[in-house]
Image (cartoon, helix red, strand yellow):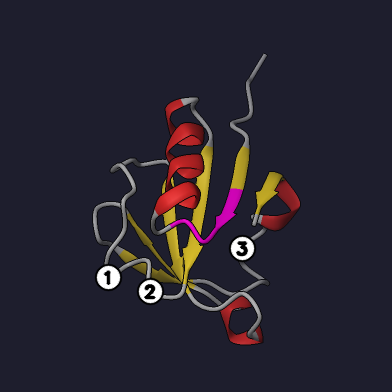
């Protein structure tokens, strides 16, 4: 039997309560997609291979075609056609 790692999306995750929520999910073994306007520049998130940070305003359509950066600083550009994160997301926190 294989276990599927659950995924959460946390907006406003660069600091404060949002960062705290994202870090708690990481500690509990979830995949976390963390978002805020400038999250790759500065954030309070722990480093993890299960973390993807996404810069952008969630009110703007351009954020849907996102450029994610993992906690090691590696960046990749993804489009909705090649990224099915939303279909596999367990929880979204705003």
Q: Position of residue 6 (x, y in %)?
A: 62, 35
Q: Residues within 10 Å of mark 3 (few under 14, many from 20)?
A: few
Residue at far left of view: 72
Q: Which residue is mark 1?
A: 41
Q: Which residue is mark 2?
A: 38
Residue at the spot 39% in from the left edge and 55% down from the top edge:
15
Foreground tag (3 vs 1) = 1
Foreground pick, 29 / 94: 94
Q: Which callout, 2 or 3, points at the residue further toward the start of the chain?
A: 2
Query: CA gap, disc 2 to disc 3?
Result: 21 Å
Q: Secondary structure at mark 3?
A: loop
Q: Which residue is mark 3?
A: 83
Residue at the spot 57% in from the left edge and 78% down from the top edge:
63
Query: CA gap, disc 3 to disc 1?
Result: 23 Å
Q: Is residue 1 left or right of residue 23?
A: right
The quadrant the N terminus occupies is top right
Q: Position of residue 56 (x, y in %)?
A: 50, 77
Residue at far right of view: 87
Span colored in magenta: 9-13
- Determine whether label 1 and label 2 are within 8 Å by CB: yes
Looking at the image, is 3 positioned above or below residue 48?
above
Q: Is residue 11 magenta?
A: yes
Q: Name the disc covering residue 3, or none.
A: none
Q: Quadrant of residue 57?
A: bottom right
């Amino acid at each position: 039997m294989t276990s599927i790692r659950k995924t959460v999306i946390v907006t406003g995750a660069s600091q404060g309560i949002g960062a705290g929520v994202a870090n708690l999910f990481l500690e509990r073994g979830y995949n976390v997609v963390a978002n805020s306007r400038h999250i790759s520049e500065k954030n309070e998130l722990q480093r993890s291979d299960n973390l993807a940070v996404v810069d952008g305003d969630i009110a703007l359509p351009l954020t849907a075609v996102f450029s994610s950066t993992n906690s090691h600083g590696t960046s990749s550009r993804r489009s909705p056609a090649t990224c099915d994160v939303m279909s596999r997301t367990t929880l979204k926190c705003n």
